[in-house]
Image (cartoon, rainbow, N blue to C red):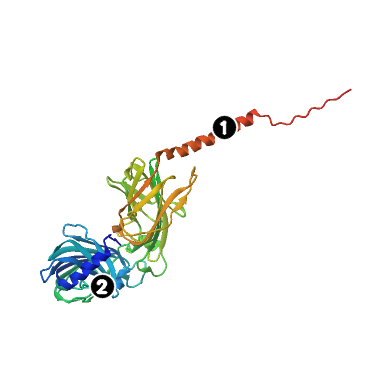
Amino acid sequence: MKITRCSTFLLLIIYSICLIQAKIVNKNVERSLDISTQLIKDLFKITATNSDGLPISVYTFIVPAAERKNLAFISARDENKKELKYTERLVDGNHQFIIAFPKSVSTEVFIIEAIYTKRLIPHPMEIPQSGKQLVRYEGNLYLFSPYETASQKVNVLLSSSNILSHTQVKPYNVASNKIKYGPYENIAAFTNQSLIIHYENERPFLTTTRLERVIEVSHWGNIAVKENIFMTHTGALLKGSFSRYEFQKDSRSGHAIKSYKTILPSSASDVYYRDTNGNISTSNMKIFRDYVELELRPRFPLFGGWKTQYTLGYNMPSFEYLYNSGDKYLLKMRLIDHIYNDMVIDEAEIKIILPEGVSNIELTTPYTVKRGPNELHYTYLDTVGRPVITLSCKNLVENHIANFNLKYTFSKITLLQEPLLVVAFFFIIFFIAIISLRLDFSINTTHSHKD
């Protein structure tokens, strides 16, 4: 989840003062609920006003405790798409995100985006090979808010027009794969109206249960990236046994994952893709101007509950991501990268291997991550080892694809260490060879006989 750095103490003081002075009302709420993939993308465009005409300094957005564990990402921005700072606190079992406005006015128009994972439940939990995947969504129809809402509309986007059932709170309208609710008026604060939709969703429910990403930086002009990826199909489980014949004969296994597309940086080269059995040749790479598209096809189609594991690696020129001024260096790269559309990563471990001799390391990440103790990595011609920065984070989505900044100091003279070690090694070998050839280590025995 995205975290901004602002003073929690000062913000809470402002928040308390505003609660006494201000009577905030949600004048209008336009909600867009996208449940067409395995992710739930909830977007609110809120027009908040102060009924007393006083300026609004902060606004409280609530995420219920039952939904907080599934919240992967949240952001707030104004009408001009400028990011708004916020802080989080727990009050009465609910998580409050207190948004601060840089300019206090009596009416604020802003957008809140929240992305949830693993809230769509397959229903039924098991389906046959040729069956259709049906899922069930359950949430709140209204904006769960500590303020009264004067008017609200809800637009729901589904993955198909096959809707088995849905909550019917008038007025509403169903058209193909869209449901429109509202407008609803004069909704009291903390109103909870259940919204349940049971529908067909055969989009890939593919979860990366673990990502092990290694970034190895070389000052000889190359950055090597290696990813060990563990995946599971987390959709409806396969009921019964798998038939290859039926799979090739019948193409209705829409919930099976046959392939997916990974996006690599435009400068990626020497790409390899292999699993525990060796190199996988069933892949297709297309090079575009701004990126490289790699279509990956596992050795077998993935049905519900099935798992796979593979390694993806590539090289990139360091001049595109490594900047320097004298002995000061800055590495600017993505913390994680695109694996597949609407991806979900349960757990990620990122290791950044720096050249030997690096010092004064300063790391800045785009969101909160857990940093482990520094390690050492040894390769050819290393003496004291290369420093390794270890990071870990959980519940990631595409919105977490952002750059980190890693500053460090490295003396260019250190680059001579490895060539000098090679020269010294061969010098010693030749010196030993010369000495061994010039010395006579044979044992001669002479006998003299007197008559």
State whether residue 451 is above or below residue 388.
Answer: above
Badge number at residue 430 = 1
Distance between the alpha carbons at the discs numbered 1 and 2: 76 Å
Left or right: residue 429 versus residue 301 is right
Asked if disc 1 and disc 2 are in contact, CB closer than 8 Å, the reply is: no
Looking at the image, which is closer to me, 424 or 301? 424
Q: Is residue 393 left or right of residue 383?
A: left
Q: Is residue 428 shown above or below 68?
A: above
Q: Amino acid at mark 2?
A: Gly
Residue 98 position within the rendered picture, expressed as x and y whole percent measured from the top left: 23, 67
Which element is circle 1 on? helix
Task: Name the residue rendered at 39%, 70% in the picture.
Answer: 239
Q: What residue is at 30 percent from the left and 69 percent from the top?
A: 68
Q: Quadrant of residue 135?
A: bottom left
Residue 447 to residue 420: above or below: above
x, y (%) of residue 264?
33, 50
Dot 2: what SS? strand
Total labels drawn: 2
Q: Which comes before the other along the chain, label 1 or label 2? A: 2
Task: Inspect this view and state whether residue 419 appears.
Answer: yes
Residue 371 point in image, percent of width and height: 39, 58
Which sits in the foreground, 375 or 252?
A: 375
Q: Residue at x 50, y 38 (%)?
A: 421
Q: Residue 82's quadrant in the figure?
A: bottom left
Q: Amino acid at mark 1?
A: Phe
Is there any visible trace of residue 159 in the rendered image?
no
Asked where in the image residue 308 lies, by quadrant, the reply is: bottom left
Left or right: 376, with 14 as reference point: right
Residue pointed to by mark 2: 139
Q: Residues within 10 Å of mark 2 (few under 14, many from 20)?
A: few
